[in-house]
Amino acid sequence: MTRAQQSGFWGGAALAVFAVSAAPGMVWADSAKLTLYALHFYVPSFNPGDHAGWTVLARGWLALTWFLPAAYALNLLSAVAGAVVVGGVHRLLSRWGESQAAAHGAAAVVLVSHPLWWAAAVAESYAPALALVVAGALLLTRGTARSRFSAGLCFGLAVAAHAFAAVLIVPLVAASHRRSWPVLVAGAALGAAPLWLGVFGAPADPLTGFGPRGGAAWRWHVSAFLNPRRIVLGAMLVAAGVVGALGPVGLWGVVRRAREGGVSRHPSPRLAVAALCALAAVLTMYSPFRLHLMVAFLVVGAVLLAPPVLTLRWCLVHLALQAALYGGAAASASLWGREDLGVRQLPGRHNARYFLWPPKSGEASAERYAGELFAALPAGAVVLADFNPGAVLRLAQVVHGARPDVDVIPTAIDDALATPDAAATLSGRIADSRGGGREVVLADGWPPYYRLEELRAMGYAFSACGPGLLVRYGADPQ
């Protein structure tokens, strides 16, 4: 089997794993939001959380997979992209002159790395962004003007899909001959058009209805998601994410490589190390709830710098052991009564299994939640939600045509939480929504978000409405 065929084998194996792992329908939060963006073709946008490059890819993918349900099709897009990353990493390292054992070890580690496997099972921007980086790096190895322009196109689209892709791209471009930079820049400018065109105007966000915010959105993201006081906890989480993704066998492969005097074949190893360290420093300050996915950039960058040297037998051991460790971690958390993991709880979602076990083929909590809530809502109700369930409810209205008589305000709770007195703001929002005798329903009742006790002290009462809560006030009829 040639090295190219081996790369194809790894890519095919990854596709099988990721396709089987793909969620069958809607998934909470960002996945639902991005699916909604793709269906509305929400481009261009300069806002960092909108991932406009992903939307362009997703729209094209939906045209190719028109015969599949949209949510499932976009989950499969991540599966295909993840397979490209695995097979592409093997091929790229081979072209850089790494040994066969190093290329195999890197592919095995990336295939079952927790962040990539998880992201490859749902509609997310991480796997497509990484796939574009790897594809661009492969094109750079060909050395023609056309391939350099195509590489720039991939790099630009990758950054438009996820800004952190730049961390892997900059060292690759810097290592290229300066004469190739104009062609690379031209391709990158075209690829990044879904992002920078947003400076000249953009449509309203199809989820929230907010207009384009440009630079203000970047400032908001920095203030909302970066906090220097999280550095110690963040450093532990980032380190745990990277070490856990490499696994004991992968770490042993890295040590083995170092003992054998392995030298990095990366075109610009020093700059790559500096870029990865800078990203790691940023991630230590980032909100913890996204770190389990964001470390994917660190993991892929690390294996390109120092791929673990593993024989095929040890690769198989690594694949089996990592799957056992992920499954065991999820089961242990449940046995020890820590199934909520101390993070946001959602109706029907088992947090330990959801976050620790990468496959999502059995994940139907979001679909079930939306169906149960819409079935229970009074006619013409107004639903006040936070982003996690709100994105799912809005997506269900689009893909399933569910309850067009109902108004879902998908970030009403988030908006209230951003004010000095969240309960008072929420009370005002409830009062405003009751115009015309309409019923108001809270999409969930998780105390840290929905402030139920404070609202009760203001005279509100609540009764079950499927997985939501019907709001009453004072002497309202029951």
Image (tube, rainbow, N blue to C red):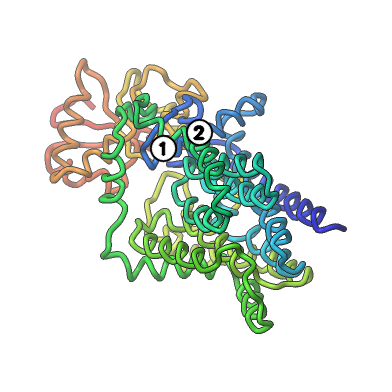
299 or 473: nearer the eye? 299
The N terminus sits in image quarter:
bottom right
Mark nearer the N terminus (2 vs 1): 1
Which mark, by number, is residue 50? 1
Residue found at the far bottom of this picture: 259
Residue 368 in view (yes/no): no
The C terminus sits in image quarter:
top left
Question: What residue is rendered at 51% in x and 63% in y?
Answer: 272
Image coordinates of residue 451 in percent, x first then y, are 22, 45
Residue 455 occupies which quadrant of the picture?
top left
Question: What residue is rendered at 21% in x and 39% in y?
Answer: 416
Image coordinates of residue 132 in percent, x first then y, are 59, 45
162 or 436: nearer the eye? 162
* Whether residue 316 is situated above or below residue 391 in the rendered picture: below
User: Which amino acid type corresponds to the residue marked 2 in the rendered image?
Assistant: Thr
Q: Give the spatial CA distance, label 2 vs label 1.
A: 8 Å
Question: What residue is rendered at 73% in x and 48% in y?
Answer: 16
* Whether residue 410 is situated above or below residue 232 in the rendered picture: above
Image-based side of 287 in relation to 472, left or right = right
Question: Label 2 neighbourhood size at 10 Å, few (<14), some (14-19), many (20+)?
Answer: many
Secondary structure type for disc 1: loop
Image coordinates of residue 325 in percent, x first then y, are 60, 67
Image-based side of 118 in relation to 436, left or right = right
Contact check, label 2 and label 1, Cβ < 8 Å: yes
Question: Label 1 neighbourhood size at 10 Å, few (<14), some (14-19), many (20+)?
Answer: many
- Look at mark 2 in the image and give the residue it sits on: 55
User: Which amino acid type corresponds to the residue marked 1 in the rendered image?
Assistant: Asp
Image-based side of 472 in relation to 254, left or right = left
Which mark, by number, is residue 156? none
